[in-house]
Image (cartoon, rainbow, N blue to C red):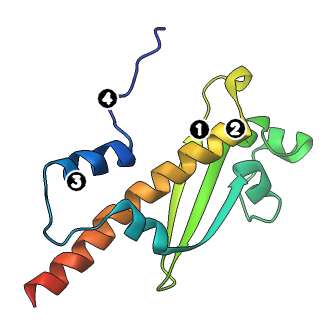
Amino acid sequence: MQNIQSPRRDDAAIEQDIIAKGKTAPRVTPADLQANIVGCYYFTAQNGVQDALHEQDELTRLTGAHAELSLLTFCVLVLKNGFTVTGESACASPENFDAEIGRKIARQNAEGKIWPLMGYELRSKLAD
C-alpha cells in the first residue's frame, strides 16, 4: 500500500489563516479549547481489560487477553465542567506501533470532539 498524506492541516496553521484574514467575530480558538481541558488520561485497551468485565472466548480464557489490545490507545480528556471526551488510535501493523505516536493521535481525535461542543456552547450564548 502507498502512504497517503492526510489533507488535514493543523490547528495552528488554520489559526494563522483566520488571523491573517482579520476574522474577529467571537469564535472558539485553539487556546480556548486547550484551556477547557483539565485532565488527560492515556491507556491501551490491554490496560483497560485488566479491570474490565468482558466476554471471553475460549482462546482468551486459556491464554489471556488478545495481544492486539496493546495496539489500541485511548485518550480521555476531562473538561472544566466535568464532561469527558475520548479519542482513540488503532495501529494496523504491530511493527509500526509507537506508544507516543498513538497517544498523540488519540489526543488529537479526542480534541476533535471538543470543537463542536464548544461551538454549540458559543452559538447558544450568541443567540441569547
> Which dot, 4 or 2, sits closer to the camera?
4
Q: Name the residue under label 4.
A: 7
Q: Distance between the residues labelled 4 and 2?
A: 25 Å
Question: Where is residue 48, by image quadrant?
Answer: bottom right
Q: How far apart are marks 1 and 2 (CA)?
A: 6 Å
Report whether 24 appears left or right of 94.
left
Find numbered disc 4 in the image and state the secondary structure of the residue it sits on: loop
Whether label 4 touches label 2, CB < 8 Å: no
Residue 19 numbered mark, or none: 3
**Which numbered disc, 4 or 1, marks the residue that appears first in the sequence?**
4
Question: Where is residue 65, by image quadrant?
Answer: top right
Q: Mark 1 points at which residue?
A: 90
Whether label 1 touches label 2, CB < 8 Å: yes
What type is the residue that disc 3 sits on? Ile
Tell which of 94 and 16 is nearer to you. 16
Report whether 116 appears left or right of 84.
left
**Which numbered disc, 3 or 2, marks the residue that appears first in the sequence?**
3
Residue 26, how many percent across, how many down? Answer: 18, 72
Report whether 111 appears left or right of 61.
left
Q: Residue at x 33, y 42 (%)?
A: 13
Q: Distance between the residues labelled 1 and 3?
A: 34 Å
**Which numbered disc, 4 or 3, marks the residue that appears first in the sequence?**
4
What type is the residue that disc 4 sits on? Pro
Report whether 114 appears left or right of 61.
left
Residue 71 numbered mark, or none: 2
Whether label 3 touches label 2, CB < 8 Å: no
Find numbered disc 3 in the image and state the secondary structure of the residue it sits on: helix
Which quadrant does the C terminus fall into? bottom left
Residue 2 to residue 5: above or below: above
